């Protein structure tokens, strides 16, 4: 591949940050509502009610398992098709996903509304403790009403990110948090709806949040649109296959405490358990950045595989790892230093649990960068279709290593269990790096011992990549394009068209989007795909409006867009997609 | 880009060689504008023109607007690949163009 010293990987960094932002918000929002509900329940209804809502937290995990599978599968399939420029196919799949989610979530809601007592029994509340059972049953009934809202939020957020509407995600999470707080307070202070009211308030807040997200798909310019008259279910088996490792993760999160909690109680009793609960409570917050970066990588890798863009894939991996090392690393340092004050939120300094809480928070802080890398690696293998490997590494990550180390360090008491937290993540990280290095030595598709996935460019010598930040770059790069065409032994006409399309697309984007307000960047890639030659542009300028797109396609329009009309007239195919706030043109020559 | 001019009374023949792109077109137009004061017929010879982009087309269009007020303009010896650009942009409807 002809490579130039890249001026920057601005576009990839922007895509990773944009994608991570929405996922981090989603993770934090779940924690916020959980904590708010707990505090208000405890203060206004009582500690038995709090225990009942904690037990019913299993239902939250159940929704997370279902939404996680659908969301992961849909995200990978849709981003892959977006990468290939198949907008119609994406919409058919997306509409089918929405339909399936709607049907499934309504059935789940009906089950919880009709059989709340049965669910209460399943989570451990029995009629022998009438008060606990009553609270659990009532809360479950109110909570299950919101099943569609819960599940839809997780399914829709990645698709809203593909639309580049991160502000909607922020608005949705804000609505969720405010509605939840208001609903809870209204319930306990005005309506006195008890635990049913608490569950219902949470449900209403999730519904409102989901409605806000739906706005992303009903705009005129939306790339993704919901149309139940035009659905395709053909991708559903793939969706399930790709999404299942998320279920493994959630199930691991559910099963692990069954073992670990017992070991903690044996080693340090309720004092140690109370300390450990602090780490469990803060976990969603502190791990959200790493989970966000991993989720961003999952979304982008799927898209770049669809584009057969090995270079962007490598850049995404490099950028993600850089953010993990510096971003999550910095967060870990802050978390480590702030551990005493965080522990004070839950326990006074004179409490016997305080010291243990500080210790476990610090151990968790040390684990964060390694945890983030492990999550990133699992996302990567999942997005590249290595589902069995994803299941296996998830099992190691969420269950095997932590349980094995906890059992091995049990003779060290509570300290041994705390040390198992960072050591399990470090051990898995080392396993991944070493195993990859050994495999890479034997794999011709991987150029570096530290490569984490196969190079998707089957023939890197048949592509060229260029970055443009101004008109001078276009003039300079045209010479490079000409050399590339000569090296590919193209005939005179094809070579002319490649250079022409390069100049016209670059100048179109510069004239359209370089408004002088900030620095913009265009990444152009020319590569062979089967029998066709593809010219692909990505830029971070403003999107083309529907009217501008119509003018581009209008043959009667004169003067303006003369260059793009030349491209439309001479190319085999031209597609335009705006996804994650990045303009993409795909020209088939 | 190279320009070679041959004047015969009020007829100016210009041999354009190389590329007419976003970089060279402004200089081409400026040079031509200064050369056509007493010209009533402008002939652009594209025999050795390897490349033309929309920037080149716009400069030709601007020249045409000037020549329409005082005479004629035609383009000769256009290669097949350059001709395809003229055809797809409908410049063949407004210009007198002949192929090689």
Image (cartoon, coloured by chain):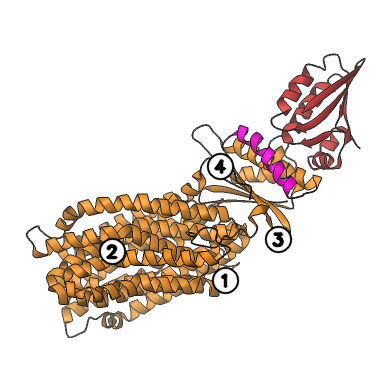
Q: Are marks 2 and 4 on the same chain?
A: yes
Q: Residue at x 66, y 34 (%)?
A: A475
Let me know if residue A135 appears in the view.
no
Q: Is residue B6 above or below residue A519?
A: above
Please report the residue visible at 55 percent of the width from the left and 42 percent of the height from the top.
A6
Q: Is residue A300 above or below residue B30?
A: below
Chain B's shade in the image? red
* Residue, disc 4: A5
The residue beneath circle 3 is A530
Q: Is residue B73 above or below residue A178?
A: above
Crowd rating for badge 3 (residues with CA inside 10 Å; few <14, some 14–19, many 20+):
few
Q: Which label was assigned to residue A235?
A: 1
Q: Which label is found at residue A422?
A: 2
**Mark-to-mark CA distance, 1 and 3:** 23 Å
- Asked if the stretch drawn in magenta spans residue A472, the answer is yes
Q: Main secondary structure of the magenta part?
A: helix
N-term-proximal mark, 1 vs 3: 1
**Magenta residues?**
A470-490
Q: Chain letter of disc 1?
A: A
Separation (CA) of disc 1 from disc 2: 39 Å
């Amino acid at each position: 591949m002809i490579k130039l010293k890249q001026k920057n990987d601005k576009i990839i960094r922007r895509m990773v940050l944009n994608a991570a932002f929405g996922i981090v918000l989603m993770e934090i929002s779940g924690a916020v509502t959980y904590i708010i509900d707990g505090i208000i329940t405890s203060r206004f209804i009582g500690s038995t009610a709090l225990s009942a809502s904690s037990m019913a937290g299993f239902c939250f995990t159940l929704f997370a398992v279902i939404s996680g599978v659908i969301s992961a599968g849909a995200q990978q399939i849709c981003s892959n098709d977006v990468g290939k420029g198949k907008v119609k196919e994406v919409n058919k799949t997306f509409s089918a996903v929405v339909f399936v989610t709607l049907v499934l979530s309504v059935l789940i809601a009906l089950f919880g509304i009709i059989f709340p007592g049965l669910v209460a029994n399943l989570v451990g509340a029995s009629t022998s403790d009438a008060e606990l059972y009553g609270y659990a049953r009532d809360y479950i009934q109110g909570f299950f009403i919101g099943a569609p809202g819960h599940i839809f939020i997780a399914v829709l957020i990645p698709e809203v990110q593909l639309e580049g509407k991160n502000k909607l995600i922020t608005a949705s999470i804000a609505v969720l948090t405010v509605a939840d707080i208001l609903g809870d307070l209204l319930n306990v202070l005005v309506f006195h709806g008890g635990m049913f009211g608490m569950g219902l308030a949470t449900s209403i807040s999730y519904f409102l949040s989901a409605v806000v997200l739906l706005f992303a798909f009903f705009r005129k310019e939306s790339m993704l649109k919901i149309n139940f008259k035009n659905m395709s279910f053909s991708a559903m088996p793939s969706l399930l296959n790709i999404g299942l490792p998320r279920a493994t993760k959630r199930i691991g999160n559910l099963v692990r405490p069954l073992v670990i909690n017992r070991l903690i109680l044996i080693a340090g009793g309720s004092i140690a358990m109370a300390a450990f609960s602090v780490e469990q409570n803060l976990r969603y917050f502190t791990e959200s950045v790493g989970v966000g970066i991993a989720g961003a990588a999952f979304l982008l890798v799927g898209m770049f595989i669809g584009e057969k863009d090995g270079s962007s894939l490598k850049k995404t991996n490099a950028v993600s790892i850089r953010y993990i090392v510096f971003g999550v690393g910095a967060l870990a340092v802050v978390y480590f230093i702030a551990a005493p004050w965080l522990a004070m939120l839950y326990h006074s300094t004179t409490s016997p649990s305080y010291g243990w809480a500080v210790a476990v928070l610090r151990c968790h802080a040390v684990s964060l960068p390694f945890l983030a890398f492990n999550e990133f690696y699992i996302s990567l293998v999942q997005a590249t279709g290595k589902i069995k490997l994803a299941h296996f590494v998830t099992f190691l990550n969420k269950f095997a290593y932590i349980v094995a180390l906890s059992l091995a360090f049990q003779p060290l008491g509570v300290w041994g269990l705390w040390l198992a937290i960072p050591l399990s993540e470090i051990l898995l990280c080392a396993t991944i790096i070493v195993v990859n290095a050994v495999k890479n030595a034997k794999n011709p598709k991987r150029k570096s011992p530290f490569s984490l996935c196969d190079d998707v460019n089957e023939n890197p010598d048949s592509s060229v990549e260029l970055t443009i930040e101004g008109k001078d770059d276009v003039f300079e790069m045209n010479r490079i394009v000409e050399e590339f065409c000569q090296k590919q032994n193209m005939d005179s006409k094809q070579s002319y068209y490649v250079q022409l399309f390069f100049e016209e697309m670059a100048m179109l984007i510069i004239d359209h989007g370089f408004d002088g307000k900030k620095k913009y960047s265009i990444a152009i890639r020319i590569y062979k795909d089967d029998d066709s030659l593809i010219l692909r542009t990505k830029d971070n300028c403003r999107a083309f409006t529907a009217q501008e797109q119509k003018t581009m396609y209008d043959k009667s329009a004169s003067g303006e867009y003369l260059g793009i009309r030349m491209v439309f007239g001479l190319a085999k195919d031209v597609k335009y997609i705006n996804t994650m706030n990045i303009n993409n043109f795909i020209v088939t020559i | 880009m190279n320009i070679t001019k041959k004047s015969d009374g009020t007829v100016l023949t210009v041999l354009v060689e190389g590329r007419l792109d976003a970089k060279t077109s402004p200089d081409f137009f400026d040079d031509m504008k200064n050369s056509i004061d007493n010209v009533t017929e402008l002939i652009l010879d594209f025999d050795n023109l390897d490349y033309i982009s929309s920037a080149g087309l716009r400069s030709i269009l601007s020249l045409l607007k000037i020549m329409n007020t005082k005479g004629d303009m035609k383009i000769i010896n256009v290669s097949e690949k350059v001709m395809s650009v003229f055809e797809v942009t409908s410049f063949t409807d407004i210009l007198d163009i002949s192929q090689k």
